[in-house]
Image (cartoon, rainbow, N blue to C red):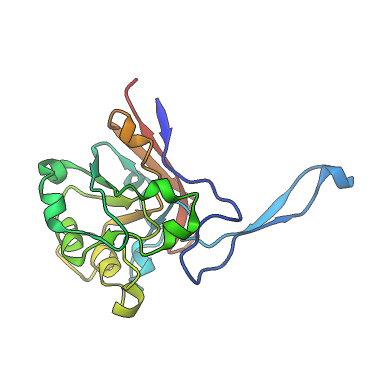
């Protein structure tokens, strides 16, 4: 069985404060006498379910088109349930209880905020995020290729004022002794929590040339 973990992109989708609105522009319309329906879109790459490439915070980092396609297939995903309230951080000790993180290639963090994805005010209002200490720990786990979270950003609202240390810790190739992690944000995890845990996750991006992020179609494969 396949379970979709991506949000649908629409004009009223919750957006990180200060980012551009989504725009859907009709080109041809059959109802107007055109031979077909065609549409152009203006999409901010960090809105909706998306993956951050290392180049998002590292000018020499890999872009979406640089990353090998097998980096987006996960054969040992792990979903962790760490309920958090408004403004709370995911701490290293929250992760320490999950002893199998060191065998996972994808870590998906469920804070419970997926339930607010259709309520933009609640979803954007001082959402839970990853602490710097937890980010440092995850960057050190050799098996991990990527992490994902069910909030609008892996980093809290103070990130802009602080220079985005969590993003740098995860994405900057000059930090740590191992490759950067990929970061998935806006992942819809609520339905997954009521099902058997997945044995494989696919999260394929658009192959946008030299871009810092891409929307993804993220799907969990679950045993029926």
Is 117 or 198 nearer to us in this picture?
117
**Left or right, 95 with reference to 129:** left
**Left or right, 116 with reference to 13:** left
Residue closest to the far right: 33
Q: Position of residue 50 (x, y in %)?
A: 43, 53
How many numbered circles are shown?
0
Residue 163, by quadrant, is bottom left
Q: Is residue 196 above or below residue 202?
A: above
Quarter of the image containing the C terminus? Answer: top left
Residue 34 showing in the rendered view? no
Is 199 or 110 nearer to us in this picture?
110
Residue 172, by quadrant, is bottom left
Quarter of the image containing the N terminus? Answer: top left
Q: Is residue 192 above or below residue 147?
A: above
Residue 221 showing in the rendered view? yes
Q: Position of residue 98 (x, y in %)?
A: 13, 44
Q: Position of residue 54 (x, y in %)?
A: 33, 63
């Amino acid at each position: 069985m396949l379970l979709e973990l991506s949000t649908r992109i629409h004009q009223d989708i919750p957006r990180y404060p200060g980012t551009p609105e989504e725009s859907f522009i009709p080109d041809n319309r059959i109802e107007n006498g055109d031979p077909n329906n065609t549409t152009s879109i203006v999409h901010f790459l960090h809105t909706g379910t998306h993956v951050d490439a290392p180049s998002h915070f590292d000018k020499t980092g890999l872009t979406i088109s640089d990353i090998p396609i097998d980096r987006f297939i996960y054969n040992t995903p792990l979903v962790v349930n760490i309920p958090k309230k408004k403004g709370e951080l995911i701490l290293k000790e929250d992760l320490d209880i999950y002893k199998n993180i060191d065998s996972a290639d994808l870590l998906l963090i469920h804070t419970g905020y997926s339930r607010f994805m259709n309520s933009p005010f609640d979803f954007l209002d001082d959402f839970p995020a990853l602490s710097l200490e937890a980010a440092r720990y995850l960057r050190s786990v050799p098996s991990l290729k990527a992490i994902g979270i069910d909030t609008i950003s892996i980093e809290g609202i103070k990130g802009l004022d602080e220079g985005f240390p969590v993003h740098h810790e995860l994405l900057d190739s000059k930090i740590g002794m191992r490759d950067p992690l990929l970061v998935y944000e806006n992942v819809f995890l609520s339905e997954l929590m009521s099902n058997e845990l997945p044995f494989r996750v696919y999260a394929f991006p658009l192959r946008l040339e030299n871009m810092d992020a891409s929307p993804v179609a993220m799907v969990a494969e679950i045993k029926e």
